Image: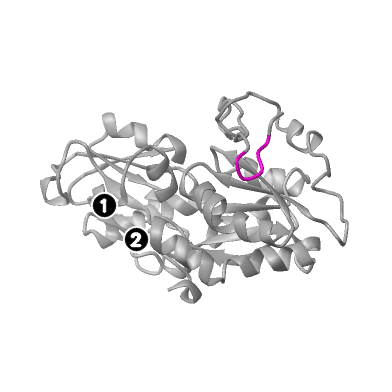
Amino acid sequence: MSLRFLSAQRSTESSAAASGALGRRALTVAALAVAASLSVPAAAQDPAKKQIVIGATAGSNYDQLQSGIVPQLQKKGYTVKLVEFNDYVQPNLALADGSLDANFFQHEVYFNQFKNNRKLDLTALTQGPIAPMGIYSKKRKTLADLKDGDRVSLPNDATNLARALVLLQQAGLVTVKEGVDPMRISELDLASNPRKIKLLPLDAAHLPRSLDDAEFAIINGNFAISSGLKLTEAVVLEKTPDHYLNIVAVKTRDKDTQWAKDLAAAYRTPEYKAVLDAKFAGYAKPAFLR
């Protein structure tokens, strides 16, 4: 299997199951081949470890690593391999089983729920930027054009579904029952839906394609960008709270290793901030990058 350093081919795997699959580029391979193909296994705990394997979802998360993080690690003598994913399940499973050393694709709320549900011994290393979730449409120019009964597609995983419903409430389209944890809202927690919009939960990676059918789609920023949409094309962009910023995740046993410290430090450098300012304008950022 051909995994690239900075310029290597992106790992791919066909997306056939509901849980998703590894990658989407040049080759179709089994997920276990990621670990088997590495000259130094990700699971090996060498104190002088200089090869790091990082997974990210397609689009801006992968691109941030490629242009902003990998060059800094290379300057410190690391060889970095990036693996691209097209879903929100496999990156954490690959991290837990040793196929990856780290991943960068998820916010803290999703991460905590996933690792607790799956009983994975993973730790958030540092925060990073995220492309804001947005409401997009090919059929309506603004929310003022919304008609009663319009269809709105949105993510079907619990944490991003809640996030999307909060965005709809902020836009004045629905109201949520009082006292409900905003990070756990579901369709059952709606107090009112005066425009009788029809909610269509879908796998997050499929939401851009739903724009051909639904009047509106609420799309995670990375999947919007990887599909060719621009943040400026959104009808509405969320004001992203800190708990929805991306995090870098590692196995808990690795959090104090030198390579993990160097990885975390790369996110706090002027060089990384310069890349963000030049190539990722409009992204929500942690305080240390604003």
Q: Is residue 233 left or right of residue 248?
A: left
Residue 158: x, y in percent? 49, 50
Relative horizontal placement of residue 285, taking residue 94 as reference (left or right): left
The answer to whether residue 203 is seen in the rendering is: no
Disc 2 on helix, strand or loop? loop
- Does the magenta segment cover residue 92? no
Residue type at tag 2: Gly
The disc at residue 12 is none
Q: Earlier in the sequence, mark 1 or mark 2?
A: 1
Residue 263 vs 96, above or below: the answer is below
Q: Which residue is mark 2?
A: 282
Q: Nearer the viewer, residue 182 or 100?
A: 100
Contact, CB < 8 Å: mark 1 with mark 2? yes
Residue at image coords 24%, 51%: 193
Rendering coords of residue 145 (x, y %): 11, 46
Q: Is residue 111 left or right of residue 161?
A: right
Q: Is residue 141 above or below residue 236?
A: above
Look at the image and tell me in which quarter the C terminus lies.
Answer: bottom left
Relative vertical location of residue 279 with respect to residue 262 in this rendering, above or below? above
Residue that label 1 marks: 232
**Front residue (pair 231, 69):** 69
Tell me if mark 2 has few (under 14), some (14-19) or many (20+) residues whose alpha carbon lies within 10 angstroms of its own. some
x 83%, y 44%: residue: 41
Task: Say what amino acid the circle numbered 1 marks.
Answer: Thr
- Magenta residues? 3-7
Q: Position of residue 37 (x, y in %)?
A: 78, 34
In the foreground, 232 or 15? 232
Residue 248 in picture, x, y percent from top left: 61, 59
Dividing the image into 4 quarters, which one contains the N terminus?
top right
Residue at image location 62% in from the left, 61% down from the top: 72
Q: Secondary structure at mark 1?
A: helix
Give residue 132's quadrant in the image: bottom left
